[in-house]
Amino acid sequence: MAVYTAVDPDDLAALVAHYDIGTVLSCKGIAEGVENSNFLLETTGGRFILTLYEKRVQEGDLPFFVDLLGHLARQGCPVPAMIRDRGGRAIQQISGRPACIIQFLAGISLTHPTPAQCAAAGAALGAMHKAVEDFSGARENSMGCAHWRSVATAAGDLDTVLPGLQAIVDAELAFLDDRWPTDLPRHVIHADLFPDNVLMLGDRVTGLIDFYFAATDFRAYDLAVTHASWTFSDDGRTCDGARASALMRGYASEIDLSADEVAALPLLARGAALRFLLTRAHDWIHTPADALVTRKDPAPFLERLRRYQAADAADLLRAG
Amino acid sequence: MAVYTAVDPDDLAALVAHYDIGTVLSCKGIAEGVENSNFLLETTGGRFILTLYEKRVQEGDLPFFVDLLGHLARQGCPVPAMIRDRGGRAIQQISGRPACIIQFLAGISLTHPTPAQCAAAGAALGAMHKAVEDFSGARENSMGCAHWRSVATAAGDLDTVLPGLQAIVDAELAFLDDRWPTDLPRHVIHADLFPDNVLMLGDRVTGLIDFYFAATDFRAYDLAVTHASWTFSDDGRTCDGARASALMRGYASEIDLSADEVAALPLLARGAALRFLLTRAHDWIHTPADALVTRKDPAPFLERLRRYQAADAADLLRAG
């Protein structure tokens, strides 16, 4: 759930007046995005998302996101591009925050995707990877493998989350540090393509959204994150074989992974499970239990990690 | 800010299938309403608000709200009527909550209304009072004068909010108890028509919303609540004469207050200021300072109370 910065109606009218999108009809704060303030803005020219960037998104990163989403939209990917005003500016200021007016995309986020929907998501991820190959921008992945140890340290005593978790994490960090690949194909990836960040209508993907973790990393790691978030039961204990093979098949319809990438997938999936286990554990420890934000339970990502550690993990990561 | 109950996409599709409003295109949680979960729902048939009623709204009160808003909408008031499904049902169940699909109204809420906008709000309140006169429903005002003493007690030690507040409140409760009218014109009133509950486009009122405090009480008390919330500076220290007289003039264009009502207005306004002072003080004491809901400062309503206690208060409450 997002925390909202209020927008003054007069300031909003003045902002919208810079664009060729008509005049304001309605503007409602929406519960979307991680830590930005988002509004569903309706004008006489259509519907848009107005995003005010709060502290998590660095203002200096905004031109990267504008360029990335513009590039992907021009390539036909269903992503919410930032709109430019009559002066060509995409990044504005309102209520003391940097802000963008963004394309509205129809569709709803799934909670329990079917195999057909997993196939569509895999294909959309693959098509996005194809489209981003010739994108010249780059951004360090501050949530990538090199940073997991510091996320773990910042979290504090992991045993307060789940007894024994600290030792499991320490062992996994050591294991991954020794083996993490260095030379797989890399480009800008989404890095957080959970079902809430994909809009669908029926079996059709209508939007890939919330690119604010997008950064340069292995494309196969992006696929591993998507696998970890789309193919498991809510408790993380069971990977659904039909969903998993459909997701991998959808991706393979767009991208031909190299043998090295296929071989690395179980390791990358362990990394993906650990990354979300760590950030959830961090938020679990640092969010008061009575706060009105939902703390996401870290345990289902420990379960996923265990599943990916198993000897037969490669079977789950095959297009089948 | 609202707390959201999640809605499963399949459940939503099944709910919408009961209505003649097409199929779901988008559904986003919005930060509107006091303690309900609200979603902006777009279907192939238009835009709607989906409200899930959380604990503050009693399920047994829902038929009253459905009837009231239906009555007002039929009389031409710009209120968000609940839509009925093909079976004539307005009250549904989703995610274990009672829920309604409601008309969407364009417009935005003002933060700093102009005199012309205050006049429009006053006229809209008056027109609503005219329209409700022949409404047969009734509901006890659980936030009315008879309940203020128990709100004060439930709040706890008011001096922890502002030093000296307990004595001020005790004296005001005694004053109002002795003098509160018993025989002014009464019918169902909105009882909470703050600027956030009025949607406007320019100087035109396009929506009166959030009727969930609506109850049977003096119509002149409703006008006093609206006066207290539309005509003061943010800190509550200054009543803007131009806004106040415009609001009263707008109301007078629809409703001819009796001499008794005009005479009672300063007292009713003291009551209105006390009612919001007490509920804000209650929430101030009972909401942790670090919670992610904005605690509304009680102090500006103490300032309003002081202003309405002054000998010349009647001047502020004249159509002028």
Image (cartoon, coloured by chain):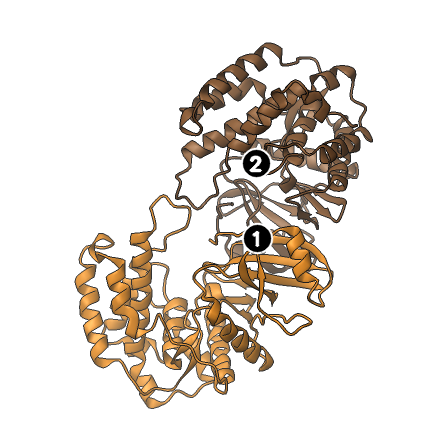
Chain colours: A brown, B orange
Q: Residues within 10 Å of mark 2 (few under 14, many from 20)?
A: some
When the figure is inspected, residue A19 is found, relative to residue B306, above or below; the finding is above
When the figure is inspected, residue B73 is found, relative to residue A237, above or below; the finding is below
Q: Which residue is mark 2?
A: A235
| Residue B230 horizontal side relative to residue B37, left or right | left
Q: Can residue A143 be seen by looking at this rendering?
A: no
Estimate the x, y position of residue B3 in percent, counting from the top left: 48, 52
Quadrant of image for the C terminus of chain A: top right
| Residue B303 horizontal side relative to residue B43, left or right | left
Q: Nearer the viewer, residue B201 or A257?
A: A257
Estimate the x, y position of residue B86 in percent, counting from the top left: 69, 71
Q: Can residue A253 be seen by looking at this rendering?
A: yes
Q: Amino acid at mark 1?
A: Gly
Tag 1–tag 2 contact (CB < 8 Å): no
Q: Amino acid at mark 2?
A: Asp
Q: Chain of mark 2?
A: A
Q: Which residue is mark 1?
A: B29
| Residue drawn at x 62%, y 11% as measured from the top left | A179
| Residue drawn at x 55%, y 70% as measured from the top left | B207
Q: Nearer the viewer, residue A24 or B171?
A: B171
Looking at the image, the residue that sits furthest to the top is: A178
Closer to the camera: disc 1 or disc 2? 2
Name the element at disc 1.
strand
Badge 1 and badge 2 both on one subunit: no
Q: Nearer the viewer, residue B258 or A16?
A: B258
Q: Chain of mark 1?
A: B
> Looking at the rendering, which quadrant does residue B318 occupy?
bottom left
Name the element at disc 2.
loop
Estimate the x, y position of residue A299 in percent, counting from the top left: 51, 32
> What's the distance in space between the residues labelled 1 and 2, CA to CA?
25 Å
| Residue drawn at x 79%, y 31% as measured from the top left | A249
